[in-house]
Amino acid sequence: MKRASPPNFDQSAFKQALSQFATGVTVITTRAASGQLIGITASSFNSVSLNPPLVLWSLATRSASMPVFRANSHYVVNVLAASQLDLCKRFATVKGDRFEGVSHAEGDTGMPVLDGALAWFECHNRSRYEEGDHVIFVGEVERCGVHENAAGVSPLVFQNGQFHGLKPL
Ligand SMILES: Cc1cc2nc3c(=O)[nH]c(=O)nc-3n(C[C@H](O)[C@H](O)[C@H](O)COP(=O)(O)O)c2cc1C
């Protein structure tokens, strides 16, 4: 098989092209062995398989939360509503306790589920793949749910570095 040729673009051109792809935004949450709650904003979430129910997301190797996500058996993917932009920013930037003042409940797996999330997936940490400067996490979904008023709640959408709500065409 032929090998890949070296890229003919620089990293900023790559980022700019990637950023045209509109995504939802999630916060992936878990509980460290110490009991500390951990969360990180991630737009790399996607579905993988219906049977068995599998999802994926990727985490930068340099992420401070990497050791906890590598070691933990479970995590929750919380899909954010447009009204949760503050949570998106909080879980991407705050250095201290990101859960301070953030209302949440404990899911069946003991992991934190954020109040007001549009949907959530409680996952078993099934497998991980090291690729480039990220690790791809594949989660087996044990529980999932949607906001009680999902039809009336706009998702948070991220595209070209900007946040949007969603309106039907
Ligand atoms: C909209 C948005 C999407 C993001 N998606 C990802 C992602 O998919 N994977 C990732 O590793 N970081 C992503 N980030 C960056 C992380 O949220 C950020 O680096 C995080 O605070 C790192 O936390 P930690 O170093 O404490 O683990 C995203 C940030 C934003 C604002």
Image: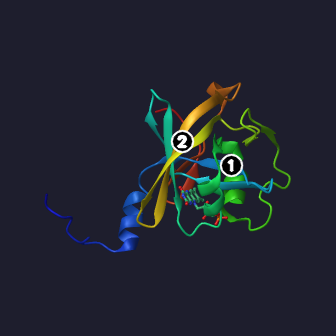
Give above or below for 5 relative to 50: below
The N terminus sits in image quarter: bottom left
Position of 77 relative to 72 (above/below):
above
Q: CA distance from mark 1 to mark 2?
A: 13 Å
Disc 2 C-beta below 8 A from ligand 1: no
Badge 1 amino acid: Thr
Q: Quadrant of ligand 1?
A: bottom right
- Give the amino acid at mark 2: Gly
Residue 59: where, in percent of width, then height? 54, 58
Residue drawn where x is 72% and y is 58% of the image = 90
Q: Secondary structure at mark 2?
A: strand
Q: Quadrant of residue 125 in the image?
A: top right
- Say if residue 154 shows up in the picture: no
Query: In this figure, which residue is indicated by the disc labeled 1?
Result: 29
Does 148 sit left or right of 24 as displayed? right
Q: Residue at x 70, y 46 (%)?
A: 84
Q: Nearer the viewer, residue 150 or 107?
A: 107
Which residue extends farthest left? Answer: 1
Colouring style: rainbow
Query: Which residue of the protein is positioned furthest toward the bottom in this rendering?
Result: 10
Q: Residue at 56% of width from left, 70% of height from top? A: 62
- The numbered disc on residue 139 is 2
Find out whether the residues at labels 1 and 2 contact each other: C-beta distance under 8 Å: no
Quarter of image, res 118: top right
